[in-house]
Amino acid sequence: MLLDINSDTVIVLDFETTGLSPDCGDRAIEIGAVKIVNGVLVERFQKLMNPHRRIDAFIEQYTGITNKMLSKSAPCAEVMHEFSEFIDGYNLVAHNASFDSRFLDAELSRIKRNQFGPFACSMLISRRIYPDAPNHKLGTLVEYKNLPNDGTFHRALADAEMTAYLWLEIIEDIKLEYPFECISFDIMKKLSRTPKKATNDFLLSMSNN
DNA sequence: TGCCAGGCCCTCTTTAGGGCCTT
């Protein structure tokens, strides 16, 4: 399914988790997501979820999410059922999408719903479009591009919103340099896989079509 | 028992190693 990002919908999402790898038993503890329609953030989704295991002090400090907060939250399965309906059929975006896609796949597999749309990665695209940025961490890029934020980092909805603004900024910056009328999600996804040194040639060839 | 990520990308590369990103 290929959706035109200027006229259709993209879901930008972010997970907070107990660690780095679902293959090592780590679980999602919060999901945040933003729906973008015609370049506008129109709908938000945010839920804590209880993995029924304690999170360590590092994660509590890193995210501000505590064991007490999670103990009062709905189970992961209940939240992921609801979230799977929110993202159903849409193209997906995340910053370092390989991380979020692995947790999305793992959590949806647990509820027998492991089908979701194609993912594009704002981090891989940022490395190609902003090679002069100090680094390509989300927080750095938000500051580098002076994107809207409320100073909250490492919470799912805040990070998803900042990633959404970064996504829109990337599209606008590409349009400033190349004669695109619209940039499809498929082009963005291919851009994230284009060899970095071939970025200019790729965008020129796509914009001339 | 003890340990444990994974994908991308650059380079002093390709029969490899290490930094960057995500929590």
Image: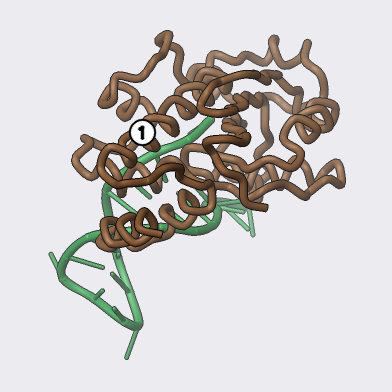
- Alpha-carbon neighbours of circle 1 within 10 Å: few (<14), some, or many (≥20)? some
> Between residues A128 and A134, which one lies in front from this camera angle?
A128
- Seen in the picture, residue A198 relative to A152 is either above or below; the reply is below
Residue A58: x and y in percent read 50, 24
- Seen in the picture, residue A42 relative to A118 is either above or below; the reply is above
What chain letter is assigned to the residue under label 1? A
Q: How is the image coloured?
A: by chain
For chain B, the rendered hue is green
Tell me which corner region of the image, top left, top right, bottom left or bottom right, holds residue A152. top left
Direction from residue A5 to residue A75 in the image, left or right: right
Tell me which corner region of the image, top left, top right, bottom left or bottom right, holds residue A193. bottom left
Residue in the image at 50% along x and 52% along y: A189
For chain A, the rendered hue is brown
Direction from residue A23 to residue A4 in the image, left or right: left
Residue in the image at 51% along x and 18% along y: A158
Residue in the image at 67% along x and 53% along y: A1
Looking at the rendered structure, the secondary structure element under dot 1 is helix
Q: Amino acid at mark 1?
A: Glu
**Which residue corresponds to mark 1?**
A172
> Between residues A143 and B11, which one lies in front from this camera angle?
A143
> Between residues A16 and A145, which one lies in front from this camera angle?
A145
Residue in the image at 81% along x and 19% along y: A74
Residue A19: x and y in percent read 57, 36
Q: How many numbered marks, from 0 up?
A: 1
Q: Quadrant of the C terminus of chain A?
A: bottom left
Residue A115: x and y in percent read 77, 50
Residue A173: x and y in percent read 31, 36
